Image: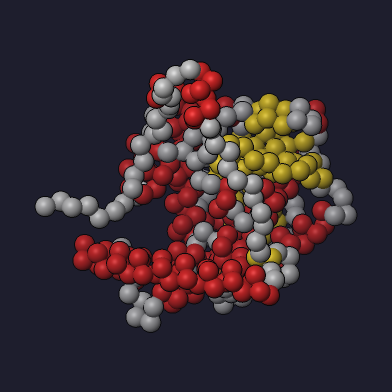
Amino acid sequence: MRRMSSLPTLENCGMSDQLGVGIETSNSFRSTCFHSYCENGEWPKEVKRLSEQDFSEIRRWKKPTDFVYKNPALRLKYSEADKERILALDNDFAFLDLDSKLTQEELQKIPNLMTAGHLDMAWDVPEHDLIVISDIKSSVFAVKDRCESLQLHAYGLAYSLLKGRSKYITGIWDASDGKHYYGNITETNTFDFEAIKERIRNACNNNSDKYTKGTHCGGCWKRDSCPAHLVDMGDENRFSKLFNGTATEADIREALVAAKGLGELANKVSEHCKDWVKRHGPVRSEDGCKSWQARLRSGRKSLNQEQVMADLGVDSLEKYMKQGEEYLVYDWLLVK
Ligand code: SF4
Protein backbone atom coordinates (compact mmCIF):
# COMPACT_ATOMS: atom_id res chain seq x y z
CA MET A 1 0.00 0.00 0.00
CA ARG A 2 1.29 3.43 -0.91
CA ARG A 3 0.08 6.65 0.64
CA MET A 4 -1.69 9.06 -1.69
CA SER A 5 0.28 11.97 -0.27
CA SER A 6 3.48 10.29 -1.48
CA LEU A 7 2.35 9.67 -5.06
CA PRO A 8 3.89 12.86 -6.56
CA THR A 9 7.37 11.99 -5.27
CA LEU A 10 6.93 8.23 -5.69
CA GLU A 11 6.75 8.80 -9.43
CA ASN A 12 10.45 9.61 -9.23
CA CYS A 13 11.77 8.23 -5.95
CA GLY A 14 10.78 4.83 -4.55
CA MET A 15 12.04 5.66 -1.04
CA SER A 16 9.94 8.78 -0.51
CA ASP A 17 6.95 6.82 0.82
CA GLN A 18 8.93 4.81 3.39
CA LEU A 19 10.69 7.86 4.72
CA GLY A 20 7.52 9.80 5.38
CA VAL A 21 5.57 7.48 7.72
CA GLY A 22 6.16 9.49 10.92
CA ILE A 23 5.86 12.83 9.13
CA GLU A 24 2.58 11.82 7.54
CA THR A 25 1.10 10.79 10.88
CA SER A 26 2.07 14.13 12.40
CA ASN A 27 0.72 16.05 9.38
CA SER A 28 -2.63 14.31 9.55
CA PHE A 29 -2.79 14.95 13.32
CA ARG A 30 -2.13 18.65 12.64
CA SER A 31 -5.07 18.63 10.24
CA THR A 32 -7.30 16.93 12.80
CA CYS A 33 -6.48 19.60 15.43
CA PHE A 34 -6.98 22.38 12.89
CA HIS A 35 -10.40 21.08 11.75
CA SER A 36 -11.47 20.75 15.37
CA TYR A 37 -10.46 24.38 16.01
CA CYS A 38 -12.28 25.59 12.88
CA GLU A 39 -15.46 23.79 13.93
CA ASN A 40 -15.50 24.63 17.65
CA GLY A 41 -13.40 27.78 17.93
CA GLU A 42 -11.18 26.07 20.52
CA TRP A 43 -8.04 23.98 20.23
CA PRO A 44 -8.66 20.38 21.35
CA LYS A 45 -6.86 19.06 24.44
CA GLU A 46 -4.84 16.66 22.28
CA VAL A 47 -3.07 19.63 20.70
CA LYS A 48 -0.46 19.21 23.46
CA ARG A 49 0.84 16.19 21.57
CA LEU A 50 1.96 18.45 18.72
CA SER A 51 5.47 19.83 18.70
CA GLU A 52 5.82 23.53 19.57
CA GLN A 53 6.80 24.17 15.95
CA ASP A 54 3.74 22.39 14.51
CA PHE A 55 1.33 24.10 16.90
CA SER A 56 2.79 27.52 16.28
CA GLU A 57 2.41 26.91 12.54
CA ILE A 58 -1.24 25.80 12.59
CA ARG A 59 -2.14 28.62 14.99
CA ARG A 60 -1.34 30.98 12.12
CA TRP A 61 -3.50 29.06 9.63
CA LYS A 62 -6.70 30.64 8.41
CA LYS A 63 -10.06 28.89 8.57
CA PRO A 64 -11.21 27.85 5.07
CA THR A 65 -13.68 30.23 3.48
CA ASP A 66 -16.44 29.19 1.02
CA PHE A 67 -15.11 27.44 -2.08
CA VAL A 68 -16.33 29.57 -4.99
CA TYR A 69 -16.18 28.43 -8.62
CA LYS A 70 -17.48 30.21 -11.72
CA ASN A 71 -18.45 27.60 -14.28
CA PRO A 72 -20.50 25.84 -13.04
CA ALA A 73 -21.41 28.42 -10.41
CA LEU A 74 -20.59 26.90 -7.02
CA ARG A 75 -20.41 28.23 -3.46
CA LEU A 76 -19.47 25.41 -1.11
CA LYS A 77 -19.35 25.94 2.64
CA TYR A 78 -16.54 24.64 4.85
CA SER A 79 -19.13 23.54 7.44
CA GLU A 80 -20.79 21.29 4.84
CA ALA A 81 -17.58 19.65 3.59
CA ASP A 82 -16.91 15.96 4.08
CA LYS A 83 -13.71 16.06 6.17
CA GLU A 84 -10.84 13.70 6.95
CA ARG A 85 -12.41 10.72 5.24
CA ILE A 86 -10.14 7.87 4.24
CA LEU A 87 -10.08 7.16 0.51
CA ALA A 88 -8.64 3.95 -0.87
CA LEU A 89 -8.19 2.35 -4.28
CA ASP A 90 -7.46 -1.29 -4.98
CA ASN A 91 -5.16 -2.64 -7.69
CA ASP A 92 -7.99 -2.48 -10.24
CA PHE A 93 -8.87 1.13 -9.38
CA ALA A 94 -12.01 0.13 -7.51
CA PHE A 95 -12.97 2.15 -4.41
CA LEU A 96 -12.43 0.40 -1.07
CA ASP A 97 -14.66 1.47 1.80
CA LEU A 98 -12.38 1.50 4.87
CA ASP A 99 -12.62 2.75 8.44
CA SER A 100 -10.96 6.20 8.70
CA LYS A 101 -9.42 5.20 12.05
CA LEU A 102 -7.28 2.39 10.63
CA THR A 103 -3.57 2.85 11.39
CA GLN A 104 -0.83 2.75 8.75
CA GLU A 105 0.17 -0.71 9.96
CA GLU A 106 -3.40 -2.00 9.64
CA LEU A 107 -3.71 -0.49 6.17
CA GLN A 108 -0.49 -2.19 5.09
CA LYS A 109 -2.06 -5.58 5.87
CA ILE A 110 -5.08 -5.16 3.58
CA PRO A 111 -4.56 -7.33 0.50
CA ASN A 112 -5.14 -5.69 -2.86
CA LEU A 113 -5.02 -2.17 -1.38
CA MET A 114 -2.97 -0.09 -3.83
CA THR A 115 -3.13 3.39 -2.34
CA ALA A 116 -4.92 5.20 0.49
CA GLY A 117 -5.03 8.64 2.06
CA HIS A 118 -7.13 11.01 4.16
CA LEU A 119 -8.65 13.93 2.30
CA ASP A 120 -9.01 17.27 4.06
CA MET A 121 -12.27 18.49 2.51
CA ALA A 122 -14.62 17.34 -0.24
CA TRP A 123 -18.07 18.23 -1.52
CA ASP A 124 -20.49 16.21 -3.62
CA VAL A 125 -22.38 18.26 -6.22
CA PRO A 126 -24.83 15.74 -7.77
CA GLU A 127 -26.68 18.32 -9.89
CA HIS A 128 -23.48 18.76 -11.93
CA ASP A 129 -22.33 15.12 -11.67
CA LEU A 130 -19.28 16.62 -9.97
CA ILE A 131 -17.23 16.41 -6.82
CA VAL A 132 -14.78 18.99 -5.45
CA ILE A 133 -11.83 18.10 -3.28
CA SER A 134 -9.57 20.52 -1.46
CA ASP A 135 -6.36 19.79 0.41
CA ILE A 136 -5.08 22.06 3.18
CA LYS A 137 -1.46 23.09 2.68
CA SER A 138 0.56 25.59 4.65
CA SER A 139 1.42 27.16 1.30
CA VAL A 140 0.34 26.38 -2.25
CA PHE A 141 3.98 26.93 -3.24
CA ALA A 142 4.98 23.87 -1.21
CA VAL A 143 3.29 21.70 -3.86
CA LYS A 144 5.37 21.36 -7.01
CA ASP A 145 2.47 20.69 -9.37
CA ARG A 146 -0.04 22.84 -7.45
CA CYS A 147 -3.61 21.62 -8.13
CA GLU A 148 -2.38 19.12 -10.74
CA SER A 149 -0.57 17.12 -8.07
CA LEU A 150 -0.99 13.36 -8.44
CA GLN A 151 -2.10 13.20 -4.78
CA LEU A 152 -5.10 15.40 -5.57
CA HIS A 153 -5.96 13.39 -8.68
CA ALA A 154 -5.95 10.20 -6.60
CA TYR A 155 -8.31 11.82 -4.06
CA GLY A 156 -10.46 13.10 -6.93
CA LEU A 157 -10.74 9.70 -8.57
CA ALA A 158 -11.42 7.82 -5.32
CA TYR A 159 -14.05 10.29 -4.08
CA SER A 160 -15.74 10.33 -7.53
CA LEU A 161 -15.99 6.54 -7.36
CA LEU A 162 -17.41 6.71 -3.83
CA LYS A 163 -20.10 9.19 -4.85
CA GLY A 164 -20.71 7.78 -8.35
CA ARG A 165 -19.74 11.02 -10.14
CA SER A 166 -17.81 11.28 -13.40
CA LYS A 167 -16.04 14.64 -12.87
CA TYR A 168 -13.96 16.29 -10.21
CA ILE A 169 -12.22 19.55 -9.42
CA THR A 170 -8.94 19.47 -7.52
CA GLY A 171 -8.21 22.32 -5.11
CA ILE A 172 -5.79 23.54 -2.47
CA TRP A 173 -6.59 25.76 0.52
CA ASP A 174 -3.48 27.85 1.18
CA ALA A 175 -3.88 28.12 4.95
CA SER A 176 -1.24 30.80 5.42
CA ASP A 177 -2.57 33.13 2.74
CA GLY A 178 -6.22 32.19 3.33
CA LYS A 179 -6.89 31.54 -0.35
CA HIS A 180 -8.46 28.76 -2.43
CA TYR A 181 -6.65 27.53 -5.54
CA TYR A 182 -8.27 25.14 -7.97
CA GLY A 183 -7.51 23.22 -11.15
CA ASN A 184 -9.67 22.43 -14.16
CA ILE A 185 -12.57 19.98 -14.20
CA THR A 186 -11.22 16.48 -14.82
CA GLU A 187 -13.47 13.85 -16.44
CA THR A 188 -12.82 10.29 -15.33
CA ASN A 189 -14.48 8.44 -18.22
CA THR A 190 -12.15 9.67 -20.93
CA PHE A 191 -9.20 8.23 -22.80
CA ASP A 192 -6.97 11.03 -21.44
CA PHE A 193 -7.79 10.03 -17.88
CA GLU A 194 -6.16 6.64 -18.47
CA ALA A 195 -2.82 8.50 -18.46
CA ILE A 196 -3.48 9.73 -14.90
CA LYS A 197 -4.38 6.19 -13.78
CA GLU A 198 -1.20 4.93 -15.40
CA ARG A 199 0.84 7.49 -13.46
CA ILE A 200 -0.84 6.45 -10.18
CA ARG A 201 -0.17 2.78 -10.93
CA ASN A 202 3.48 3.42 -11.86
CA ALA A 203 4.03 5.48 -8.69
CA CYS A 204 2.49 2.72 -6.55
CA ASN A 205 4.68 0.12 -8.26
CA ASN A 206 7.90 2.07 -7.75
CA ASN A 207 9.60 -0.32 -5.34
CA SER A 208 13.10 0.99 -5.86
CA ASP A 209 15.06 0.94 -2.60
CA LYS A 210 17.30 3.81 -3.70
CA TYR A 211 16.88 7.49 -2.94
CA THR A 212 16.58 9.15 -6.35
CA LYS A 213 17.56 12.79 -6.08
CA GLY A 214 16.39 15.21 -8.72
CA THR A 215 14.33 18.30 -9.41
CA HIS A 216 11.31 16.50 -7.91
CA CYS A 217 12.99 16.74 -4.46
CA GLY A 218 11.96 20.42 -4.38
CA GLY A 219 8.35 19.24 -3.89
CA CYS A 220 9.17 16.48 -1.37
CA TRP A 221 8.25 17.43 2.18
CA LYS A 222 10.42 14.63 3.55
CA ARG A 223 13.51 16.39 2.27
CA ASP A 224 14.50 17.66 5.74
CA SER A 225 14.97 14.11 6.97
CA CYS A 226 16.13 12.54 3.70
CA PRO A 227 19.50 10.81 4.15
CA ALA A 228 20.35 11.48 0.50
CA HIS A 229 20.22 15.20 1.24
CA LEU A 230 21.73 15.10 4.72
CA VAL A 231 24.97 13.77 3.24
CA ASP A 232 25.16 17.02 1.26
CA MET A 233 25.51 18.87 4.54
CA GLY A 234 29.15 18.16 5.18
CA ASP A 235 31.47 15.17 5.43
CA GLU A 236 31.12 14.88 9.17
CA ASN A 237 27.33 15.41 9.07
CA ARG A 238 27.76 18.17 11.63
CA PHE A 239 24.04 18.88 11.83
CA SER A 240 22.91 15.38 12.75
CA LYS A 241 22.09 16.41 16.36
CA LEU A 242 19.63 19.01 15.09
CA PHE A 243 17.72 16.42 13.15
CA ASN A 244 17.72 13.66 15.73
CA GLY A 245 16.56 15.98 18.52
CA THR A 246 19.67 15.82 20.75
CA ALA A 247 21.11 19.27 20.00
CA THR A 248 22.30 21.43 22.91
CA GLU A 249 22.59 25.22 22.99
CA ALA A 250 26.24 24.93 21.91
CA ASP A 251 25.25 22.77 18.92
CA ILE A 252 22.64 25.32 17.91
CA ARG A 253 25.16 28.19 18.26
CA GLU A 254 27.57 26.31 16.02
CA ALA A 255 24.79 25.52 13.57
CA LEU A 256 23.77 29.18 13.35
CA VAL A 257 27.31 30.17 12.41
CA ALA A 258 27.49 27.36 9.87
CA ALA A 259 24.06 28.25 8.47
CA LYS A 260 25.27 31.77 7.67
CA GLY A 261 28.19 30.33 5.72
CA LEU A 262 25.89 27.86 3.96
CA GLY A 263 23.52 30.71 3.06
CA GLU A 264 26.39 32.63 1.49
CA LEU A 265 27.51 29.51 -0.34
CA ALA A 266 23.95 28.92 -1.58
CA ASN A 267 23.79 32.48 -2.90
CA LYS A 268 27.08 32.03 -4.73
CA VAL A 269 25.95 28.71 -6.22
CA SER A 270 22.65 30.25 -7.29
CA GLU A 271 24.43 33.23 -8.92
CA HIS A 272 26.71 30.86 -10.85
CA CYS A 273 23.67 28.87 -12.03
CA LYS A 274 22.01 32.08 -13.24
CA ASP A 275 25.18 33.11 -15.10
CA TRP A 276 25.33 29.67 -16.72
CA VAL A 277 21.70 29.96 -17.89
CA LYS A 278 22.36 33.44 -19.26
CA ARG A 279 25.20 32.02 -21.33
CA HIS A 280 23.84 28.60 -22.30
CA GLY A 281 20.03 28.74 -21.96
CA PRO A 282 17.53 26.90 -19.70
CA VAL A 283 18.36 23.82 -17.61
CA ARG A 284 15.93 20.99 -18.34
CA SER A 285 14.51 18.64 -15.67
CA GLU A 286 15.41 14.97 -15.99
CA ASP A 287 12.11 14.14 -17.72
CA GLY A 288 12.34 17.21 -19.97
CA CYS A 289 8.92 18.48 -18.80
CA LYS A 290 10.22 21.55 -16.98
CA SER A 291 13.05 23.98 -17.35
CA TRP A 292 14.81 26.33 -14.95
CA GLN A 293 14.99 29.68 -16.65
CA ALA A 294 14.49 33.39 -16.17
CA ARG A 295 11.21 35.15 -16.80
CA LEU A 296 10.18 38.75 -16.59
CA ARG A 297 7.81 39.84 -13.88
CA SER A 298 6.16 43.24 -13.77
CA GLY A 299 7.45 45.53 -11.06
CA ARG A 300 5.35 45.99 -7.92
CA LYS A 301 2.84 48.81 -7.92
CA SER A 302 3.30 51.32 -5.15
CA LEU A 303 1.39 54.31 -3.95
CA ASN A 304 2.74 57.70 -4.94
CA GLN A 305 2.42 59.17 -1.45
CA GLU A 306 3.54 62.69 -2.44
CA GLN A 307 0.87 62.80 -5.14
CA VAL A 308 -1.85 61.52 -2.77
CA MET A 309 -0.89 64.11 -0.12
CA ALA A 310 -0.96 66.84 -2.76
CA ASP A 311 -4.38 65.71 -4.06
CA LEU A 312 -5.83 65.45 -0.52
CA GLY A 313 -4.18 68.67 0.60
CA VAL A 314 -2.63 67.03 3.70
CA ASP A 315 0.95 66.98 5.10
CA SER A 316 0.98 63.36 6.18
CA LEU A 317 -0.74 60.05 5.40
CA GLU A 318 -0.09 58.67 8.88
CA LYS A 319 -3.78 58.39 9.82
CA TYR A 320 -4.43 56.28 6.69
CA MET A 321 -1.61 53.82 7.39
CA LYS A 322 -2.41 50.31 8.64
CA GLN A 323 -0.06 48.45 10.95
CA GLY A 324 0.63 44.86 9.89
CA GLU A 325 0.55 42.02 12.42
CA GLU A 326 3.71 41.47 14.45
CA TYR A 327 5.92 38.62 13.31
CA LEU A 328 9.04 36.94 14.63
CA VAL A 329 12.51 37.82 13.36
CA TYR A 330 15.53 35.83 14.57
CA ASP A 331 18.78 37.74 14.89
CA TRP A 332 21.71 38.32 17.26
CA LEU A 333 20.81 41.06 19.78
CA LEU A 334 23.04 42.73 22.38
CA VAL A 335 21.79 41.52 25.81
CA LYS A 336 24.62 42.77 28.12
S1 SF4 B 1 14.05 14.37 -0.95
FE1 SF4 B 1 14.28 13.45 -3.02
S2 SF4 B 1 15.64 11.69 -2.68
FE2 SF4 B 1 14.85 12.28 -0.66
S3 SF4 B 1 13.02 11.01 -0.33
FE3 SF4 B 1 12.33 12.95 -1.24
S4 SF4 B 1 12.26 12.55 -3.45
FE4 SF4 B 1 13.54 10.92 -2.54
Look at 65% across and 70% down and name the residue there. Answer: 278
Residue appearing at x 39%, y 34% in the figure = 325
x then y, percent, for residue 199? 74, 62
Image vertical order of residue 57 relative to residue 320, above or below: below
**Which corner quadrant holds the N terminus?**
bottom right
- Side (left or right) of 178 relative to 289: left
In this figure, what is the number of numbered marks?
A: 0
Give how far across and how far down residue 323 sits, in percent. Answer: 39, 30
Residue 70 placement (x, y as % from top left): 75, 30
Whether residue 83 can be seen here = no
Residue in front for this viewpoint, 174 or 268: 268
The residue lying furthest to the right in this view is: 191
Q: Nearer the viewer, residue 325 or 245?
A: 325
Q: In this view, does 178 lie above or below 193?
A: above
Among all residues in the image, which is located at the extreme top? 313
Taking the spot 35% from the left edge, 66% from the top edge, the residue there is 259
Identify whether 98 is placed above or below 59: below
Q: Which colour scheme is used?
A: secondary structure
**Residue 60 percent coordinates (x, y):** 42, 38
Rendered image quadrant of residue 168:
top right
Residue at 45% of width from left, 46% of height from top? 29
Residue 58 visible in the current orientation: yes
Question: Is 62 left, or right, of 237 in this rendering?
Answer: right
Residue 79, compared with residue 146, is above or below; it is above
**Hey, which residue is sitting farthest bottom in the picture?**
235
